[in-house]
Image: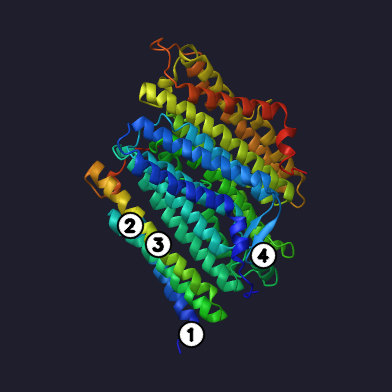
Amino acid sequence: MIPASWYLILSAVLFSLGVIGFLIKRSLITVFMSIELMLNAVNLSFVTFAHQWHSVKGQIFVFFVMMVAAAEAAVGLAIIIAIFRARATLNVDQVDLMKL
Amino acid sequence: MNTFAVNYGNLFSITIPETILEVVSLLVLVVDLGFLRKSTQPARMTAACVLGVIGSVLAGLWLLTHSGTASFAGDALVLNSLVAAAQIGILLLTALVLLLSFQAEFSRNPGEYVAIVLLATTGMMLVAAARDLLVIFVALELLSLSLYVLAAFAKSSALSSEAALKYYLFGGMSAALMLFGFSYLYGLTGTTNLNGIAVSLASQGLSPLVVVAMVLVAAGLGFKVAAVPFHLWAPDTYQGAPAPVAALIASGSKVASFAVLVAVTGSLIPAASASRGATWIVLLVWMAGASILLGNLAALAQTSVRRLLAYSAIAHAGYMLLGIAANTPQSGAAVFYYALTYALTTVGAFGVIAVVERNMGSDRFDAFAGLSRRNPLLAASMLIFLLSLAGIPPLVGFWAKFNLFAAVLRAPGVGAWGLGMVIFALAASAVSLYYYLQVLKRVYVVPAMTDEPMAVSALEQLVLLVIALLVALLGIFPSALSGWIPLG
């Protein structure tokens, strides 16, 4: 039996990888995937806690997170297509019409 | 705690206003795409906006006539006088935004625009009523996803899609951070209900995990209210999004986010444990101080009126966070009063910006030059809005600041930071007067490049005048609103 803390550590590592990817990657698609990775790390953490508490609430939460992540992906890809049409680039450094 | 009977009749009776909005948003799509495809663009926009306004008014009337307290599924959704007041305020703001959208030319799909505005409004109303982590998350995402789409609605504009992208990326990131915080709160307490979390947290010590959860939740909610250091999206989104959408993001969305922030704060600061309360309060006070400082200083350097309003919004979020950190019923009500009147004023200011942009093609300071000669009524409205934002008596912005700072000072246990932060906030709002006057100088002093009158539709003129009158009258008769909001 693998202890619950291992799952939590894995979830924290996955989440950190997502944050790092979000911060250092330059391609919009990769940045977008980093957000999805963070959401999946959250799902793992919820399932682990649901198992620990023997309560179904955490598992239900995961279903809602997956649903929202799918909706977010649809909206995000639509925005990325709009960006590509307007700028013909997917590099975040070149999306810089507005600056301080 | 995990077993409660779910009464769907009860759920339906609580969410009738939201249901009205959803039905109307589908109706708008059917009417626009089914019957009006051959009509001209302005006719379609008018029909869609009229339907949307009717829907918001119907939902608002239902709330006004069916007051009372109710809750669903162990307080997952609650309805009390303060929530109802927030929802009525949100509906009023949506109706005003739609009334100011009649002339908007950014989209060839008016039905979809109005339908998504109504969906966003539904999200705001649910956010204001939610008292369960799951409901808060789903409602916040309904609101956020609708606003991302709306920000990108001007498909031919590169600015609009860039604004949406920045809003979306920061929003997705902070939603993930907030969710991670929620998962730890659930793991520590075994429940997703805010009341249950408060009870459970009060009985355990302050572990590092609690602090991590608090920081993550603060990041998520800080993004929604555009508090430093989670504010980076605000200036770009305010500048690039279509004007009515920027107005919606700056008004209704702020009211809803502050409502949920007050609820979450009540659950994370249990009375029993001072140290845990202190962690959350320290977070809020730091965010407030940084927002006030950075918002006001960065606004000084702007030459675009939209960006100026964005930085001033960050500063206003800082003032309101002080009220939330004080965490008394009075300060909660004062924050709500502030958010509502601030949102009303901002909708008006964005209405004026939309007119100027349509005529001049820009929202730079120069575009506002000589507005007082080109359209005196518009200029007078802008004067009232900006002075109210600066907090000049007798406008409503003054009473909002007065109530808020008084509530902070009166709160027990604010100690040293209370007085210090209020003095700091007062000094900062004196600074803010400078940049608001920079705009008003263009409007009233700098001569116009042309003397031809600024074209504005009768409806826009009327709506802007009504908002300006409301801002002035609510300031002259402050008891009109405070009878409705229990300021104590």
Q: Which residue is mark 3?
A: A69
Same chain for marks 1 and 3?
A: yes
Are discs 2 and 4 less than 8 Å apart at CB? no
* Distance from the alpha carbon under mark 1 to that under mark 3: 28 Å
Could you tell me which chain the residue with mark 4 belongs to? Answer: B
Residue at (70, 36) in percent of width and height: B481
- How packed mark 2 is, by other alpha carbons closer than 10 Å (few <14, some 14-19, many 20 or more), is many
Could you tell me which chain the residue with mark 2 belongs to? Answer: A
* Distance from the alpha carbon under mark 2 to that under mark 4: 36 Å
Residue at (51, 20) in percent of width and height: B378
Amino acid carrying label 1: it is Pro
Q: Position of residue B191 (x, y in %)?
A: 60, 71
* Distance from the alpha carbon under mark 1 to that under mark 2: 32 Å
Q: Which mark is residue A31?
A: 2
Report which quarter residue B58 is drawn in: top right
Q: Position of residue B308 (x, y in %)?
A: 48, 32
Residue B378 sits above or below residue B58 on the image: above
Query: Mark 1, mark 4: which one is toward the viewer?
Result: 4
Amino acid carrying label 2: it is Val
In screen coordinates, is B398 left or right of B26?
right
Q: Secondary structure at mark 4?
A: helix
Dividing the image into 4 quarters, which one contains the C terminus of chain B?
top right
Could you tell me which chain the residue with mark 1 belongs to? Answer: A
Q: Which residue is mark 4?
A: B195
Query: Mark 2, mark 4: which one is toward the viewer?
Result: 4
Q: Which mark is residue A3?
A: 1
